[in-house]
Image: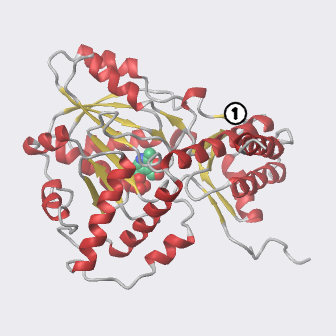
Amino acid sequence: MIPLYAHPSGRHFLQIPGPTNVPDRVLRAIDHATVDHRGPEFGRLGLAVLQGMQWVFQTRSPVIIYPSSGTGAWEAALVNTLSPGDRVLMAETGHFATLWHRLAMRLGLDVELIEGDWRHGADPLQIQARLAADTGHRIKAVCVVHNETSTGAVTDIAQVRQAIDRSGHPALLMVDAISSLGAMDYRHDEWGVDVGVAGSQKGLMMPPGLSFNALSERALAAAQSARLPRSYWDWGAMLPLNASGYFPYTPATNLLYGLHEALDMLRAEGLPRVQARHQRLAAATRAAVRAWGLEIVCQDPAAHSSALTAVLTPDGHSADALRKVILDRYDMSLGQGLGRLSGKAFRIGHLGDLNDLSLCGALAGVEMGLSAAGVPHRRGGLQAAVDYLAQAAADAAPAA
Ligand code: PLP
């Protein structure tokens, strides 16, 4: 018999929560002759993308662009603002919060960790209590992950800001917006974030390779006295050159052409519409998961991510075996369970360049995969998503 699924045709379904699908327009923009990064054309490109990133972050303060993955921007946020032995308050929301915590420890920071169950966002009241107890103001920064990509639980950053203000504590607020920026509401200035950290490969619809720090006046002031060693990540070396669109070392020229195009696409759709689209796709996904009778990792309905949904497989059923069947048969990649969720959960990415019908294709793949892998579930998840999306479209249609 001919093995039916041996040669996938059509496009691969990349439904991991980053890297996300890169639109053809962006790929074509990256396919550009590499220019002199000290010449006039580059200066114009540099200025345009630096300003564009201020717009996405919703900030008037400078944004730094690094040729690195998001991990580099995590490190940059810490080394530019802190000194050896400084105390930092972090919230254990999941795998990525754990990795940032480990990075901070390795840098010689004294990290106080608020433990979490990996099923909720960070609790602003716990943050407030820790800060209130720190009467000597030893804590120099509060670091939280906005959208915890390992669990699909969101932390309310405006509430964290209020908690810091209520405690009257001067700590800086650093926010990992790596999987939220460009997909979910993020307001750097309004929420009083001091350092926002992001990456290119999620809501910005770009390949991996660029990362970002959005700053604040307080963060810039902290950088004046911070003593952790820094060279490659030094904001001080970047900012004077960025003012005219240039960089202190060779920038990722072609990725910046792609970023320029991606920013144009986001501008044309408008951030409110981009966010509403993500909310709609997320709600449809959750409707499917509930109809299948499976459990969503995030237990707080107010904290459900609109970028991804992490789903637990029933006890005794490997999420990795399910993902393998789906990849082999339907050529779709789903996110694996990370850290303590390894083998127990899979993640459906629904962020970036995605629409109702691509999501339906992805959910069809999950539903067929659940049957093929023998994972107990009810039928009708895809139908529940279709019903949700059809209703959303009808509600949005202008009255006849
Ligand atoms: N923080 C979050 C929330 C992430 O989702 C990721 C990656 O997925 C990272 C940090 C690490 O970023 P990178 O893998 O680009 O270094």
Residue nearest the observer in this picture, 397 or 1: 397
**Which percent across, then down, holds residue 92?**
42, 32
**Which percent across, then down, holds residue 255?**
39, 70
For this view, does 63 lie left or right of residue 231? right
From the image, which quarter does the C terminus lie in? top right
Q: Which colour scheme is used?
A: secondary structure
Q: How many labels does the image show?
A: 1
**Which percent across, then down, holds residue 77?**
25, 46
From the image, which quarter does the N terminus lie in? bottom right
Label 1 sits on a secondary structure element that is: strand
Q: Residue at x 15, y 65 (%)?
A: 241
The answer to whether residue 306 is visible is yes
Ligand 1 neighbours mark 1 (CB distance < 8 Å): no
Q: Which residue is drawn at 70% across and 62% down?
A: 327
- Is residue 189 placed above or below 212 in the rendered structure? above
For this view, does 228 lie left or right of residue 50? left
The answer to whether residue 344 is visible is no
For this view, does 269 lie left or right of residue 112? right
Q: Residue at x 85, y 42 (%)?
A: 380
Q: What residue type is labelled 1?
A: Glu
Residue pushed farthest front?
Answer: 400
Residue pushed farthest bottom?
Answer: 33
Residue, disc 1 = 295
**Which percent across, then down, holds residue 27?**
50, 74
Residue pushed farthest right?
Answer: 1
Disc 1 crowd rating (10 Å Cα; few below 14, some 14-19, many 20+) is some
- Is residue 23 placed above or below 51 in the rendered structure? below
